[in-house]
Every structure is written in C-alpha cells, then in structure tokens.
Amino acid sequence: MRIGRVIATVTLSHRHPSLAGARLKLAIPLSWDNLTGRSDQSMGEIAVFDELGAGVGSRIAMSDGREAAMPFYPDAKPIDAYNAAILDTLRYDAKDIND
C-alpha cells in the first residue's frame, strides 16, 4: 500500500466492460520526503482504478501490482493500481522518520 496524490482524471474512448462504474485517475506516488515537505521530486505517474470518487488534489491509499486486482477476486479486472481509500488527514511523528 502506498500513498499518492491524484493529479488528473483519465478519459477513455473505449473501456473494458469490467471497468464500468468507475473512473481511472492519474496519481503520483508520494515518498516520505514528499510527505514531509523535504522534496517535491515526482516518482512518476500511474493510472489508478477509482470507485470511491477521488478528486484532483486528493491524497489516496493505493495498492498496485497483483494486489490491486485482489479486491475483485474471483472476478478479473485488467488493472495495475487500485484506490483503496481517500485520506482525510495524515499524521506522523517526526521522531519516527529516519533522516
């Protein structure tokens, strides 16, 4: 599970039937340095399957790889990343983060 920030909505001209009822969002995975404000360097964008309605600017908890399709088992969905939660707040203790 990773934390990411939604930067755009993906528009499709055609979709696989199993993707009905959801949208694809373009998100940037965030590192500890991004989250703590020590860096603004991007790690690259990924398309995320979103059934929760995350908006641009939302922070989300996302899983990727094989685990992204597991919430739909035994049905198959052709996805590589899944939005598991929209994060309202994110708190951490600075002493728990290694410099």
Image (cartoon, rainbow, N blue to C red):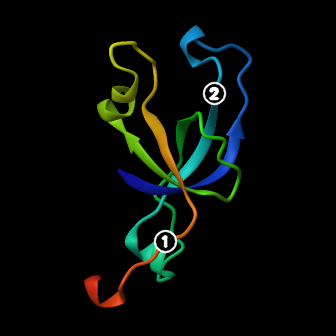
Q: Is residue 63 left or right of residue 9?
A: left
- Is residue 99 visible to the viewer in this orientation of the structure? no
Marker count (numbered): 2
Residue 23, image x and y in percent?
A: 65, 31
- Tell me the kind of residue under disc 2: Ala
> In the drawing, what numbered circle is on residue 22?
2
The residue that appears at 29% across and 82% down in the rendered structure is 97
Q: Are marks 2 and 1 in contact (CB under 8 Å)?
A: no
- Whether residue 39 sits left or right of residue 74 in the image: it is right
Q: Residue furthest bottom?
A: 95
Q: Secondary structure at mark 1?
A: loop
Q: In front: 49, or 43? A: 49
> What's the mark number on residue 38?
none
| Mark 2 and mark 1: Cα distance apart in space | 25 Å
Relative image position of residue 63 (x, y in whole percent):
39, 43
* The image quarter in which residue 73 lies: top left
Q: Residue at x 35, y 85 (%)?
A: 93
Residue 45 position, x and y percent, is: 53, 48
x, y (%) of residue 48?
53, 38
- Mark before the other along the chain sequence, 2 or 1: 2
Which residue is at a point 55% across and 38% down the rendered structure image?
47
Provide the residue designation for mark 1.
90
Quadrant placement of the C terminus: bottom left
Q: Examine the rendering and report whether any part of residue 32 can be seen.
A: yes
- The residue sitting at 69% across, 46% down in the picture is 8
Q: Amino acid at mark 1?
A: Leu
Q: Residues within 10 Å of mark 2 (few under 14, many from 20)?
A: few
Callout 1: few (<14), some (14-19), or many (20+) C-alpha neighbours within 10 Å? Answer: few
Q: Secondary structure at mark 2?
A: loop
